[in-house]
Structures are given as structure tokens and as C-alpha cells.
Image (cartoon, helix red, strand yellow):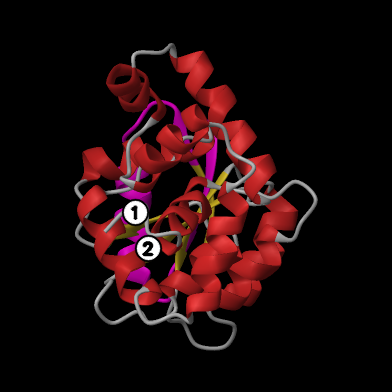
Amino acid sequence: MIKTLVVDDESLVRAGLRFILESAPDLEVVAEVEDGEKAIAAVGRTRPDVVLMDIRMPGTDGLAATEAICRLAEPPAVIVVTTFDSDEYVFTALEAGACGFLLKDTSPHDLIRAVRLAYAGDSMLSPRVTRRLIHRFTSDRPTRRRRDALAQLEALTAREREVLIEVGLGCSNSEIAAKLHMSEATVKSHVSHLFDKLAVTNRVQVAITAYRAGLID
């Protein structure tokens, strides 16, 4: 069973997420809480595999909670759940270590799939939303960020650069394998090398590097 923690300040949203998640035979909601402080405590108490984290909550918000949870020795995967247009802190949460994000109008099927992929370390990133979000927050960043990103790419092989671009486009490991004509195991190995060489912890941060370096428009 994949253990999940639901964090949202609206009880109706929490109930809806629980109903959807527990409709899947392999998902279990071990707790649901209404703010970031309780989320941090619940992670220590219930040891979830995946956390669905709202951003805007009273008290300790989802950003602070994500940062604290991702600093743990063995953190769960954190998926930001957002209305997108109103959440200015989403990008910061992703940089802090959240493995991806979902819109609050995500279909039940995609929600369940996202949790399964996060558990497997292969987060689902919507290409449309990923490009829009990352472009929005990187286009106005100082040119130093681009220089730093380009310097990081110097350590990559040509094949790793190809995988980097596909990750930045929101492709899963299986999709990358099909596009680049390699096995899924080889893709996973390349992604692992990207994590090490770029000093990042998840696919979103890999995508951010690709955008900052100008490899993706």
C-alpha cells in the first residue's frame, strides 16, 4: 500500500481527496491535516510515502512545511496541490524539494496516477503547466542564473543533455525511453546521473535547470 498524507485547510477538499485516493486499491490515506505545522508532525508520526500539500493555509503554510519535510533524512515525496494562477509560492516550493504539482481541478484518474508516479520516483509533470510555470518564474531571473545553469551542464554527456531536455518537457521515463530509443532502465540511470551532477533531488529541479540554461523555450 502507498501511504498518503492529505494537507489542506478546507475540510471538503480533504474529504474529496481522501475519497478519490482510497478508491484505488493500492492507496491508503494515513492522515489528513489542515495546516503545515500539523503536516510536519503527521509525517513524523505516520511515515507517509506521498504528501499532497496545499500552499495557502493559516499558520504554517505549505511552503514552510515542504521545506521542513524535504530536509528530513528520508523525506516522503511532496506534491504541491494548487489553484496555480493564485499561488505565487509554487515555484519556491518546487525548488525546496517538492517533486511536482497538481491543479485542484485534476481528474481523479490523474491524481491517482500522480501519487503512484511520485511513489516510484517518476513524478507526473503536465508539460503545459510545467512550461508555463517555470517560464513565468525564470524569464525574469538574473543572467547569472543562466550562466550558473550552463556551467552545470558542462559535466553532462551528450546523452544526458538529451534526457535533461525531455525531463524538462515533462516526459516520464517510459516516454523518454520511447523517444530516445533506449531502455527504461537506461533512462532511470541517466536521470540518476542528472540528479548527482546537477546537485538536485527531483525532476522538477532538473527541469528548472534546463529552462534556466535556455535549452527549452
The boundaries of the magenta stretch are 1-28
User: Taking the image as drawn, is residue 35 in sight?
Assistant: no
Q: Position of residue 167 (x, y in %)?
A: 40, 41
Mark 2 crowd level (few <14, some 14–19, many ≥20, 10 Å Cα): many
- Badge nearest the viewer, 1 or 2: 2
Q: Which three-letter amino acid code belongs to the residue tagged 1?
A: Leu
Quadrant containing the C terminus is: bottom left
Q: Is residue 77 left or right of residue 114?
A: right
Residue at point 54%, 67% (across, down): 147
In the drawing, what numbered circle is on residue 17? 1
Please name the residue that numbered disc 2 is placed on.
81
User: Taking the image as drawn, is residue 111 in sight?
Assistant: yes
In the drawing, what numbered circle is on residue 123? none
Q: Is residue 135 on the magenta stretch?
A: no
Disc with the residue nearer the chain's start (1 vs 2): 1
Check the image and report above or below for 151 versus 110.
Answer: below
Q: Position of residue 97 (x, y in %)?
A: 59, 59
Q: Position of residue 194 (x, y in %)?
A: 59, 39
Q: Quadrant of residue 110?
A: top left
Q: Is residue 196 left or right of residue 163?
A: right
Whether the residues at callouts 1 and 2 have beta carbons within 8 Å, the answer is: yes
